[in-house]
Structures are given as structure tokens and as C-alpha cells.
Amino acid sequence: MQSIVLSVVVPMYNEEAVIPALVDRLRPALDGLGVAYEVVAVDDGSADRTAELVLSRGAEWHELRLVQLRRNSGHQAALTAGLHRARGQWVVSIDADLQDPPETIAEMLRTARDEGVDVVYGVRSDRSTDTPFKRHTAGAYYRVMRRLVGGDVPAQAGDFRLLSREVVDVLKALPERAPVYRLLVPSLGFASATVPYAREKRAAGETKYPLRKMVALAWDSAANFSAAPLRLATWLGVTAFLACLALMVFGVIVWSNGTVIPGWTSLFLAVLLLSAVQLICLGLLGEYVARIYRTVQSRPTFHIGFDSASAPSASSAPSASGIPQQRSPAAVR
Ligand code: UDP
Ligand code: MG
């Protein structure tokens, strides 16, 4: 078999509405590259006909491959599954909803080869199609992350990027539990370049990133790359301690003057405040302990139930139910 030059990893969660448009645009863009490629569509435990559609499109587009996770494991876990299964010398990750224009992949590959870099980030030069809420929260996210991780994080670089085989192998070897690739990749320090692109509108369907998932990603990003929240606990403690010292002096002065006030309100407020501070600090500590716990448990963050590239050709056609036959659980990462 001809060795694969480019793998395109596309995480998909309930993306049935967008698959026809995606195939129609991705295929010519990749065929035009003139290199051997594969498209790794990672079905992240969709409840709709995503897997079925990918398989049926794959019957005529042989480069389209389905990797199906047993349950919804989240965007970053789906990316991890894709990186583990990708076979190309270069691996591009791209969203399924056509917000990242597939035509940019050609420029990314050219840039990587011409400039001899290992990573090419797609940088969103124009986000006017995103909602103002998304733009503002994303802006704040990148500002905070640049401070936490260091200046190397390219602003407005999401998960549309090209990686060399070397970077992919390094990422695969990391024991990280909840990787946030947009920060992890820059932190590795490989030579990189950027390619600007205008963020388009979602071609069809709804966003799969509700506020809850955005907050989870932001917290994973902060906690994975920085112990600053723990330091915040220390600073809160120091501030509370200094305030207590001042209050102690005040208490002694009041006592020595013989004018002891009833003092219920101040006592009540001090107890409330200090308990709140203590609980916040405990909670922060707990967050990190939970991460250590999950790392020690070292359960896989995703299970691959089916891979059309390793399935016998008969079972790569949709089964009667439309859902591919599951392969043995041995196909776990
Ligand atoms: N996605 C996924 N699993 C999830 C949520 C999202 O694989 O649990 C995929 C989704 O199908 C899409 C990509 O991640 O290909 C980005 O999601 P989306 O476009 O909905 O996010 P947004 O652009 O609104 O931030
Ligand atoms: Mg999107």
C-alpha cells in the first residue's frame, strides 16, 4: 500500500446535518493536493446517523475512514483517538462543521514543507461569523492562557493545525489525562508557523460546545498548565492572616480601653468570611487531587469500538441497523 502522506482527523459529535456538505468540500480540497491521504472521521459517540453517513460516503470515497468511539468522550478525547489511529506523515485536525476552510490545508502542508517546521497553526484572522459572546469569551480565554502558559501560545489558534509525525508520536507518548492540544502543542517547543484564515459560519447543525463544555475546557486549560489557582489559595490565606493580625491589635486596644463592644456582627462576618476562604482553598486543592487521582487510575479516556480501516471489508458496510458491527473491546487504546 502506498504510504499515507496526510491524515485529516475530523472529530464528529452528532454531525449528520453537516456531513454531506463536509464531504463535498473536503474531498476536492484533498484530491487536489496530489498526495496519498486518509480522512479519519472520529465519531465521538454520536446518537444520530453520523457513523452511518460516514460509512456510506466511505463506500465511494475510499480515503474516508470511520473510527467510532463507544461513547461521547469529548472533543479533545476524540482528537486523541484520531491522533492514535492516524497513519500519515502529517496530521491535520479540523472541525466537522466547515468553520475551518478545508482549502487552507494545502497552504498548511506547503508552509510546513517549505519552511521545514513541525507545526502549522491555523490562526483565525476573522471571527466575524462567531457570536459576540463566543468572540469575547474566546478573546479572554487566549489572554489568560498566554499569561499562564507563557507567550508561546498563538492567539486565536484553535484545533485547526498541522502536525508532523514526530510531534504526533511525542503527543501519543504523553500520559496526560485531559490534554488541551491548543496549549499542549505550543508547550512542546517544536518549530512552528502560522497560516491565517477567516472563520466561517457553521455549515449546518448546532454548536456542540454548550457553555458547560466551554467552562470545562477553560478549567482544564488553566489547571493543566498552571498551579496558579493553588497559589491564589496561598495569597488568600496570607491576606486573611494579615487582616486577622490587624483585628487582633484592634481587639487588644479596645479591651485595654475597657470599652468592650458587643461585637456580634464583626465576629459573625469574620467567621463567615474565613470559612468561605477556607472552603474555596479546599475546593481548589480538591480539583488538583482529583486530577492526580484520575492520573493514578490511568483509565483510558476513550474506547475505540470500531475502525473501518481494520475491519474486514464486508463489515465496513453499514449493518442492517445502520450501525457498524462493533469489534471486540480489545481495540481499546
Ligand atoms: N465535538 C466532538 N465531541 C464533543 C463536542 C464536539 O467531537 O463532545 C466536535 C464537533 O463535532 C466539531 C468540533 O468538535 O467537529 C468542534 O465543535 P463545534 O463546532 O460544535 O464547536 P464550536 O465551533 O461551536 O466552538
Ligand atoms: Mg464549530
Image: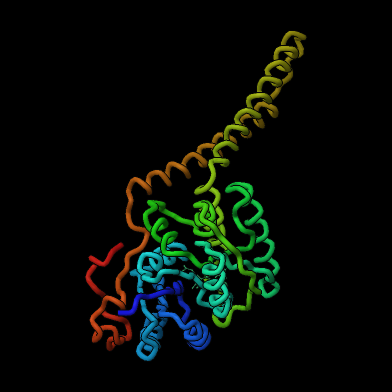
Q: Is residue 44 above or below residue 181?
A: below
x and y, in percent, of residue 111 in the image: 56, 69
x and y, in percent, of residue 251 in the image: 70, 16
The count of marks equals 0
Describe residue 5's horizontal placement relative to residue 190 as left or right.
left
Camera-nearest residue between 72 and 190: 190
**Quarter-wise, where is residue 87 in the image?**
bottom left
Q: Residue at x 41, y 56 (%)?
A: 170
**Quarter-wise, where is residue 12 in the image?**
bottom left
Camera-nearest residue between 100 and 163: 163
Decide if residue 62 is in sight here: yes
**Quarter-wise, where is residue 68 in the image?**
bottom left
Decide if residue 18 is in sight here: no
In the displayed orientation, state which residue is furthest to the bottom. Answer: 60
Q: Residue at x 36, y 64 (%)?
A: 84
- Specify the color scheme: rainbow
Q: Residue at x 61, y 69 (%)?
A: 195
Which quadrant of the picture is home to ligand 2?
Answer: bottom right
Q: Residue at x 37, y 59 (%)?
A: 301
x and y, in percent, of residue 298 in the image: 33, 51
Camera-nearest residue between 49 and 117: 117
Describe residue 75's horizontal placement relative to residue 247 as left or right.
left
x and y, in percent, of residue 98 in the image: 56, 79
Quadrant of the snapshot with the N terminus: bottom left
Q: Is residue 319 above or below residue 130?
A: below
Quadrant of the snapshot with the C terminus: bottom left
Camera-nearest residue between 47 and 200: 200
